[in-house]
Image: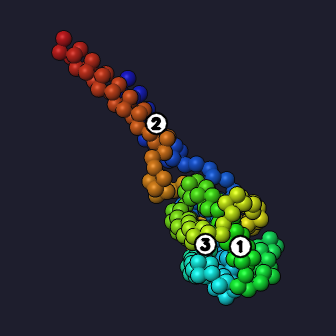
Amino acid sequence: MRILLVALLTVLLGAQPAFAQQDLGPDYVQTQFGPMGPAGRDLLQKVALAGLWEGPSGRMGLDKSANPKVQEAGRHLIEGHADLDRRTVELARTFNVQLPTQPNESQQGWLNEMQAAPARSPEFDRVFANRLRAAHGVVYKFLATVRTGTRNTAIRDYAKVCMDTVLDHMTVLEATGLVDFADTEAIPLALVAQPSSIAPSAPVGVPQRNTQYSQQQQQADGVPDGLIGLGVLALVVAGLWFWTSGRSSRRMHS
């Protein structure tokens, strides 16, 4: 009996890596920050796209509006996206993600709408505040979804910075008093930034591994369910060991 228990305990301890490993699929690559998947790549590309039209919109807010609150919102847009652009380029280089270089068709349409509105006019201020507030509201929801689901620590930190920036922009746009809150859902996410069609590739400077979690990532994401089960089984085996040992000792002294 004792030999059987020792063998069982050895097998269970040796099976720990099997419990801890998980196949993430072909769309993921393992990095030093954790698995990088489609959501992380889409996040980088969507934030880059946002900067391609929101940065120019901010400059138009400074140049074309006579409203001090619209001008203040324009300054926040310029400064916020300058910081996000720098962070986005840096992470895209790390993870070897290709970024867009031109606004998409819908974004260019919103820029054209602002350009066509007369300078120093209520029409420009209205278009500026409502187009940008609607887009930021949709993007904020997307950022929260990625932040909640990703296991990549670098993408989590980046998403948090993006959420803080977007929330700041929403606040200053709302402070203009021009936002029609009944229309803030008018721009669907598909128009804000198109889904990524770029295939995953190995990050620059980070060796590509298989699609299983490393021990370091397991620690970052919490204790795996399999490891908890292993601990329970080990306790059961230990209990059986002491129980059988106690019985053997009582027989020897009887």
Amino acid type at image mark 1: Arg
Q: Which residue is mark 2?
A: 229
Which residue is depicted at the point 53% across and 45% down? Answer: 18
Q: Is residue 207 above or below residue 221?
A: below
Q: Which residue is mark 1?
A: 126
Which residue is depicted at the point 63% across and 52% down? Answer: 24
Q: Which residue is mark 3?
A: 176
Q: Position of residue 44 (x, y in %)?
A: 64, 69
Q: Position of residue 222 (x, y in %)?
A: 45, 49
> In the picture provided, is 199 more to the left or to the right than 224?
right
Between tags 2 and 3, which lies in front? 3
Secondary element type, mark 2: helix
> Distance from label 1 to label 2 (Cα)?
59 Å
Q: Position of residue 102 (x, y in %)?
A: 76, 79
Amino acid type at image mark 3: Thr
Which residue is depicted at the point 67% across and 53% down? Answer: 25
Tag 1–tag 3 contact (CB < 8 Å): no
Q: Earlier in the sequence, mark 2 or mark 3?
A: 3
Q: Earlier in the sequence, mark 1 or mark 3?
A: 1
> Distance from label 1 to label 3 (Cα)?
9 Å
Amino acid type at image mark 2: Gly
Badge 1: residue crowd in 10 Å (few <14, some 14–19, many ≥20): some
Quarter that holds the C terminus: top left
> In the picture provided, is 202 more to the left or to the right than 194?
left
